[in-house]
């Protein structure tokens, strides 16, 4: 990551921190998938974990921030929609992750156009799930019904913790950016 522009550096640091937090949450869900025997979930979480950790490689290679942020969001959207499809589609207990965390994260780390892009993909996917449901083509959930009562509170706690940590990280980076901006302003005032 280049420190050529303080704002770009702060945004890249925020993306890096968010990707590490998301990788940690994904690791937790990997363990949960192993416990409940959700085989597709095991492979999905390994894919996501690798993808989220690869964000640091992209940032070190000085990849465009927008590209790295959209890569991060793409991994998250793909993983969430894949998990929703194989856990009951429109009736999935995982659906609220797609509807809450993806747009929230996109708004924090990317730009408005990325929010529109990923929200459109999510809405089109929901339309697809609705079509499958109406046509009677819904995929049966591969998560046993005995785990549904456990999964909902675990997801709620995981979602709350994730949003809390990301919000703290965002506020910390925002504060750092304000300090840097104030310092640069003071330097300019001294020069003039």
Image: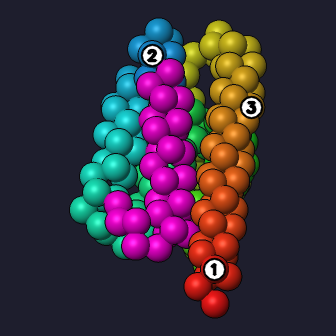
Residue 150 shows up from this direction: yes
Q: Nearer the viewer, mark 1 or mark 2?
A: 1
Question: Which numbered tag is attached to residue 160?
Answer: 3
Which residue corresponds to mark 2?
A: 31
Question: What range is drawn magenta here?
Answer: 1-28
Q: Nearer the viewer, mark 2 or mark 3?
A: 3
Residue appearing at x 36%, y 52% in the figure: 55
Q: Main secondary structure of the magenta part?
A: helix
Residue appearing at x 55%, y 69% in the figure: 7
Residue 178 or residue 91, whichever sits in front: 178
Residue 33 shows up from this direction: no
Q: Earlier in the sequence, mark 3 or mark 1?
A: 3
Q: Quarter of the image for the C terminus: give it.
A: bottom right
Q: Is residue 38 above or below residue 20?
A: above
Question: Which numbered tag is attached to residue 190?
Answer: 1
Q: Is residue 150 left or right of residue 39?
A: right
Q: Is residue 142 above or below residue 109?
A: above
**Residue 107, percent from left and from top:** 67, 63
State the colouring used for the structure image.
Answer: rainbow
Q: Earlier in the sequence, mark 1 or mark 2?
A: 2
Indicate yes or no whether the magenta region holds residue 181: no
Secondary structure under the numbered disc 2 in the rendered image:
helix
Residue 36 or residue 30, whichever sits in front: 30
Quarter of the image for residue 104 reads bottom right
Indicate yes or no whether the magenta region holds residue 23: yes
């Amino acid at each position: 990551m280049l420190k050529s522009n303080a704002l770009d550096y702060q945004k890249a640091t925020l993306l890096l921190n968010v990707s590490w937090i998301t990788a940690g949450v994904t690791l937790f869900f990997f363990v949960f998938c192993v416990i409940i025997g959700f085989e597709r979930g095991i492979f999905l979480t390994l894919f996501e974990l690798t993808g989220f950790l690869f964000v640091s490689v992209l940032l070190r290679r000085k990849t465009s921030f927008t590209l790295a942020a959209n890569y991060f969001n793409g991994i998250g959207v793909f993983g969430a929609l894949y998990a929703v499809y194989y856990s009951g589609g429109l009736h999935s207990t995982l659906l609220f992750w797609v509807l809450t965390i993806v747009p929230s994260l996109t708004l924090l780390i990317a730009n408005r156009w990325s929010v529109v892009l990923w929200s459109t993909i999510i809405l089109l996917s929901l339309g697809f799930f609705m079509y499958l449901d109406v046509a009677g083509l819904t995929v049966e959930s591969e998560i046993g019904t005995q785990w549904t009562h456990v999964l909902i509170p675990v997801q709620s706690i995981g979602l709350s913790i994730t949003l809390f940590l990301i919000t703290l990280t965002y506020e910390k980076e925002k504060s750092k950016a304000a300090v840097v901006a104030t310092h640069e302003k003071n330097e300019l005032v001294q020069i003039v």
